[in-house]
Amino acid sequence: MSEWVLYEVFVRSKHGLNHKHVGSVHAADNEMAMENARELYTRRSEGVSIWVVPSATITASASDEKEALFDPSEDKVYRHASFYKLPDEVGHM
Amino acid sequence: MYAQMVDTGTKRLKTLEEMSPEERDFQEKIDAETKIEPKNWMPDAYRKTLVRQISQHAHSEIVGMLPEGNWVTRAPTLKRKLQLMAKIQDEAGHGLYLYSAMETLGADRDEEVQKLHDGRAKYSSIFNYPTLNWADMGAVGWLVDGAAIVNQVVLQRTSYGPYSRAMVRICKEESFHQRQGYQILLDMMREGTQEQKDMVQDAINRLWWPALMMFGPHDDESPNSQQSMVWKIKRKSNDELRQMFIDQTIPQLEFLGCTVPDPDLKWNEERGHYDFGEINWKEFYDVLKGNGPCNHERISTRRKAIDEGAWVREAAVAYAAKQKQRAAKAA
């Protein structure tokens, strides 16, 4: 099986929702990856759409980059609606 | 439990002061119930222990299909046959979810399967017992899947993210397994002939003690448990889980109108738990060492499946290569 490619599987559980990562499968090609993903991750109507993506093609952020990537947004509270206090008389906005 | 006696490679627990800064950071994350994800730093022993435990768990799911496969062609009705096949397919699925979680730790699936086939890796002792009559399908679903659920429900909170998520998925499906097993027994006890009722009692007599052995040795005989608990790979001890299983199973047993082969089983008002007799530990260790009634048969069946399926895997690779070539030519 080592010649087979590892694919990551994403399933859209309902219309209107995002695809969500559910796990992985091994397959010889894209078509087989789709068949295996269907058989493995949607046996009880868990989804309405599947993506399979070769794992090797995914670029992921590294855990030691966490600060460089995510810390800058921590001190920008003004990007959140809750930062802006309005008088009660204005009502819901 | 589907994983028994998983070696952690540690003799003694380290204190926070003795740990390297990375290790301390890691342990503090675990103490704060933050899940460890594949790309996070982790001690080598944590990684190795997880690979051992998850692969053993996966192997158990895969080997666990074999005692049930024995009854697919012998199921009494088409309905029972369909249910059994759905359950067996789930077990294959559970094995695959777990292998996939194991691979996120950098382990190679083929290599780990090879370890199973040449006897270096274990699987749960329970699957080395034969399934001799139809009631065994009921008793396996009710008792064996029942014991697995007690263990796996707790493992949903295990510290390693991919393992925990696989457990959540598996637990959702296991409850169908246990219910279908119990219903098989209930039907036989309610509507069966005396001979069929005797089959139910016989199945319980044979599977009761092996089901209790699934949780592994006593806590004081389980040297690796302590480290696994600190890492939160394990969340409850063997003895705690075994007691939980017995307490929830005995009322179901009584409802069936059956008994278990344990003269010491008795409700203990003071403890609020059932007391029970001592497990035959010699049998447990013998089965684990490979001397159970079906160890040899299970592994040779697995090997045969891999060897005789080799041409299918080769054909799939050849087909994929050809399709790729064709697509390149057409472009």
Image (cartoon, coloured by chain):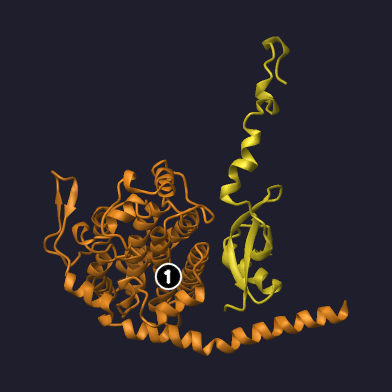
Decide which of A35, B142 is in the foreground and name it.
Answer: A35
Which amino acid is tagged 1?
Glu
Q: Secondary structure at mark 1?
A: helix
Which residue does the image show at 63% across and 51% down from the upper left?
A61
Drawing shade for chain A? yellow
Question: Which residue is under mark 1?
Answer: B61
The correct choice, above or below, for B62 with respect to B231 in the image is below
- B194 displayed left or right of B142: left
Which residue does the image show at 30% across and 50% down from the upper left?
B14
Q: Position of residue B213 (x, y in %)?
A: 25, 66
Q: Position of residue B271 (x, y in %)?
A: 16, 45
Decide which of B158, B43 is in the foreground and name it.
Answer: B43
Q: Chain of mark 1?
A: B
Drawing shade for chain B? orange
Q: Position of residue B107 (x, y in %)?
A: 49, 68
- B176 displayed left or right of B229: right
Q: Is residue B223 in sight in this rendering?
A: yes
Q: Based on the displayed image, in which of its 4 quarters is residue B60 positioned?
A: bottom left
